[in-house]
Image (cartoon, rainbow, N blue to C red):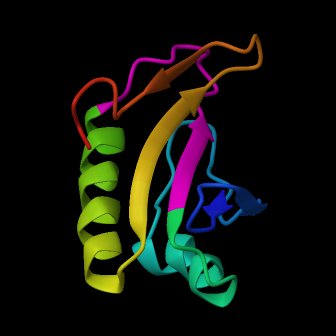
């Protein structure tokens, strides 16, 4: 989700679709549309096919890379959510990874 300076959502994009048990996410894919939409911040979200919303080590690593990239670009990563079809979710910000 791309947000403006008042944290209003200005655009929602799907930037990547992974496989059954993995996904290679590159920061350029995440931030490309944020830059094109003049976003001041983003919220990243993804779903685990296993229905387990516990962040994996890869989720934590990707989150840290996205936060660092966002700092360089001046686009803050407000949160990274692991979501599920039953409306449950985990916030990596609440867990202290952002």
Taking the magenta stretch, the answer to whether it contains residue 9 is no
Residue 27 appears at what percent x and percent y? 42, 73
Image-quadrant location for residue 75: bottom left
Q: Which quadrant: the C terminus?
A: top left
Residue 30 appears at what percent x and percent y? 54, 70
- Does 71 sit above or below residue 42? below
Q: Which quadrant: the N terminus?
A: bottom right
Question: Residue at coordinates 33% horizontally, 50% vertically from top-left?
Answer: 63
Is 72 or 49 nearer to us in this picture?
72
Residue 73 appears at what percent x and percent y? 35, 84
- Does 43 sit above or below residue 94? below
Image-quadrant location for residue 39: bottom right
Taking the magenta stretch, the answer to whether it contains residue 48 is yes
Q: Main secondary structure of the magenta part?
A: loop
Question: Residue at coordinates 23% horizontally, 68% vertically from top-left?
Answer: 68
* Stretch in magenta: 42-56
Q: Is residue 96 left or right of residue 45?
A: left
Is 78 or 85 nearer to us in this picture?
78
Q: Residue furthest bottom?
A: 36
Is 84 or 37 nearer to us in this picture?
37
């Amino acid at each position: 989700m791309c947000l403006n300076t008042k944290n209003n959502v200005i655009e929602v994009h799907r930037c990547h679709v992974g496989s059954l048990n993995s996904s290679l996410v590159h920061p350029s894919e995440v931030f490309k549309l944020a830059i094109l939409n003049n976003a001041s911040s983003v919220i990243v979200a993804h779903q685990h096919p296993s229905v387990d919303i516990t962040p994996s080590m890869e989720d934590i690593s990707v989150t840290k890379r996205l936060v660092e990239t966002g700092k360089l670009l001046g686009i803050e990563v407000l949160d990274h959510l692991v979501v599920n079809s039953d409306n449950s979710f985990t916030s990596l910000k609440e867990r202290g990874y952002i």
